[in-house]
Amino acid sequence: MRENDMLEKDEIFSKVLRAGRRTYFFDVRATKADDYYITITESKKFTEEDGSFHFKKHKIYLYKEDFAAFSEILEEMTAYVLNHKGEEVISERHQKDFKREYTQETTEDSNVSEQVEQKPASEKSFTDIDFDDI
């Protein structure tokens, strides 16, 4: 079989979803036995300090025998997120004025609750100690 025939066979049906720095590719492909399966590829663009960039790709192969279970779980998971958090996007990345809420933590020794501010890892303070301090 010619190389062009193989390329045409491989590109049966495709859709692209661009989402910020990520792009998702949904492709229907054919096995050697001429059966179909789906690949889902996440491609994420990373920019270097010098202005150059590269892409990291992750791929999922989804075969027909798994379609029903995959679809059912995906639907269940998306419904769970939307039912519990709604469709509004709330994150530090999407909202520049986002403030983390205080969470309640209970100590085991007492039933006293204290408020603790949750900070991103980049904002956590670091204390340098010597072993002599211990």
Image (cartoon, rainbow, N blue to C red):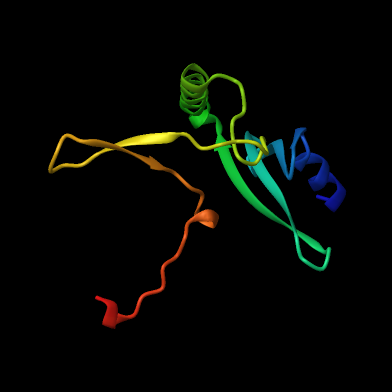
Residue 17 drawn at (x, y percent): 74, 33
Horizontal side, residue 28 vs residue 76: left or right: right
Horizontal side, residue 111 vs residue 115: left or right: left
Q: Is residue 98 above or below residue 130?
A: above
Across the whole image, how many numbered discs are drawn on residues?
0
Residue at the front extreme? 133
Residue 115 drawn at (x, y percent): 35, 38
Residue 123 drawn at (x, y percent): 53, 54
Horizontal side, residue 95 vs residue 83: left or right: right
In front: 42, or 103?
103
Based on the displayed image, in which of its 4 quarters is residue 51 positioned?
Answer: bottom right
Residue at the top extreme? 83
In front: 27, or 132?
132
Q: Is residue 16 above or below residue 127?
A: above
In front: 1, or 22?
22
Based on the displayed image, in which of its 4 quarters is residue 28 positioned?
Answer: top right
Residue at the bottom extreme? 132
Q: Residue at x 20, y 42 (%)?
A: 107
Q: Quadrant of the C terminus?
A: bottom left
Residue 118 drawn at (x, y percent): 44, 44
Q: Residue at x 34, y 80 (%)?
A: 130
